[in-house]
Image (tube, rainbow, N blue to C red):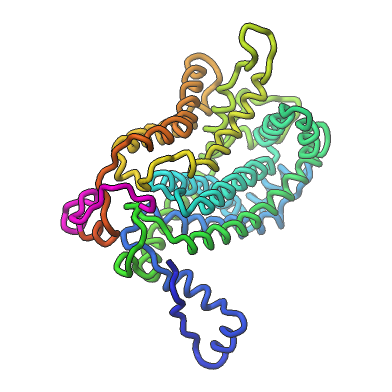
């Protein structure tokens, strides 16, 4: 996909450096001459947005760490002092906290785009798995960061989340004590979470490099799902993709800036502006919005699993909820093998397209259910929504691939582009193939 390098170093120091440390050549081949499919749409811009957001979060986090005090008696006030007494501290802290939410907005769009266009299919399984690893590390980093302000929701969120580990047989309580640094959430917990919150973004950056490297080896997918077959199918990354990515980034940051400057606390929780108090439990303990779908999955399992017609319990409700919650994330690792269809893009799978959008709506609905109290009508709705989440991966994806008849696919990316330009639409180009294509 990348082809032969077209970089030509300048005379003198340029050539001398290129022979010893070809960093300029690497940047040129990766972000200037790198060929990308010519039919990429705006949903493919979120990979670049995520890289910029990661850099933004690391930089603002480092500066905030200079003012933060990881002590149970001083942490809350150190955050308030940063907001009130440090020059531009309020903007800096708001940019970091709002940026975390928008980081997840971008990553969720990126994941759904990958699911829709089949970016997980061969030969890109490792690319997908690395992406899921990044997502897991993001979740861990965000959770630990949420604890650091040491407000009421931070403290009790740490109590609830770490208690999940105690449900694991044999080693659960030991793992929980190691995370907490003792038998209860306290100063040692805060120090551990601060250290990990500072470290994990750099681990994420390292895996992002592997993610991009893998992308450059396998090549980028495109809305048709057809592999690149000729030079006509691709264009240089710069200026075409960079201009599109830059425009999308400006729009994304403009929306984020509105929240930073006008609604900095809108995505947070009011209880987190009350200092942590172990003696007062909030009325409703809820995680940040980007964890709500998995929180709903956790609460959906409120029953014991045992041997029928006996009183023997194999998995109690607490362990069952924890397994379901982590299973909802772990199942993403197996998506490349759960989807049995040879067709990559959902654009050419009319039946699966319906189920995909049902899944997307259900995922958003799960997030809403996670914010509702566990009572009344919300309980059966949460169970039904959780069932559908797993059914999509374990039943719909494997089954539809066996009997669904896909629409004709274009013979090449260029054919799809020309057909669209002629007004015929990408799904019905003049040169199409109806036979199965394991690469398309």
* Figure check: 92 above or below 189: below
In the displayed structure, does residue 16 sit left or right of residue 148?
left
* Figure check: 310 above or below 4: above
Which of 373/435 is in front?
435
Q: Position of residue 211 (x, y in %)?
A: 54, 57
Residue furthest to the front: 435
Q: Position of residue 427 (x, y in %)?
A: 24, 48
Identify the residue shown where x is 31% and y is 35%: 351
Which of 264/368 is in front?
368
Q: Is residue 226 visible?
A: yes
In the displayed structure, does residue 404 sit left or right of residue 22?
left
Q: Position of residue 103 (x, y in %)?
A: 52, 49
Residue furthest to the top: 309
Which of 428/34 is in front?
428
Q: Which residues are magenta?
A: 419-440
* Figure check: 64 above or below 315: below
Identify the residue shown where x is 34% and y is 58%: 40
Identify the residue shown where x is 42% and y is 73%: 33
User: On the image, which quarter does residue 276 sit in?
Assistant: top right
User: On the image, which quarter does residue 149 sit in?
Assistant: top right
The overriding secondary structure of the stretch rendered in magenta is: loop
Q: Position of residue 341 (x, y in %)?
A: 39, 42
Q: Magenta includes 218?
A: no
Quadrant location of the N terminus in the rendered image: bottom left
């Amino acid at each position: 996909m990348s082809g032969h390098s077209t970089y030509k170093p300048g005379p003198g120091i340029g050539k001398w450096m290129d022979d010893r440390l070809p960093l300029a050549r690497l940047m040129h081949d990766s972000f200037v001459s790198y060929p990308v499919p010519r039919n990429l749409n705006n949903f493919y811009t979120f990979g670049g947005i995520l890289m910029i957001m990661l850099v933004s979060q690391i930089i603002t986090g480092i500066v905030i760490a200079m003012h933060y005090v990881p002590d149970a008696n001083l942490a809350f006030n150190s955050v308030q002092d940063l907001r009130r007494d440090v020059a531009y501290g309020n903007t800096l802290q708001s940019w970091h906290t709002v940026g975390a939410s928008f980081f997840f907005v971008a990553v969720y769009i990126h994941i759904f785009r990958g699911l829709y266009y089949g970016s997980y299919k061969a030969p890109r399984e490792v690319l997908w798995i690395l992406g899921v690893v990044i997502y897991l590390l993001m979740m861990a980093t965000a959770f630990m960061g949420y604890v650091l302000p040491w407000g009421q929701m931070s403290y009790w969120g740490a109590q609830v989340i770490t208690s999940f580990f105690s449900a694991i047989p044999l080693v659960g309580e030991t793992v929980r004590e190691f995370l907490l640094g003792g038998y209860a959430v306290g100063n040692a917990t805060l120090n551990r979470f601060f250290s990990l919150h500072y470290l994990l973004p750099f681990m994420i950056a390292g895996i992002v490099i592997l993610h991009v490297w893998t992308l450059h080896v396998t090549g980028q997918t495109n809305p048709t799902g057809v592999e690149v077959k000729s030079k006509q199918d691709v264009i240089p990354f710069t200026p075409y993709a960079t201009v599109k990515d830059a425009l999308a980034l400006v729009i994304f940051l403009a929306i984020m800036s509105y929240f930073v400057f006008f609604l900095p606390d809108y995505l947070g929780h009011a209880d987190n502006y009350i200092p942590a108090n172990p003696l007062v439990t909030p009325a409703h303990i809820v995680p940040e919005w980007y964890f709500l779908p998995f929180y709903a999955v956790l609460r959906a399992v409120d029953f014991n699993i045992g041997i029928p017609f006996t009183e023997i319990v194999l998995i109690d409700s607490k362990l069952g909820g924890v397994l379901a919650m982590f299973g909802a994330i772990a199942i993403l690792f197996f998506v490349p093998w759960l989807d049995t269809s040879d067709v990559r893009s959902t654009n050419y799978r009319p039946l699966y397209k319906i189920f995909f959008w049902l899944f997307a709506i259900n995922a958003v609905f799960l997030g809403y259910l996670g914010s509702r109290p566990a009572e009344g009508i919300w309980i059966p709705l949460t169970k039904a929504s959780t069932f559908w989440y797993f059914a999509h991966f374990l039943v719909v994806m494997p089954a539809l691939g066996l009997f669904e008849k896909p629409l004709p696919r274009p013979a090449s990316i260029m054919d799809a582009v020309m057909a669209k330009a002629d007004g015929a639409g990408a799904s019905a180009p003049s040169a199409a193939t109806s036979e199965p294509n394991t690469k398309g």
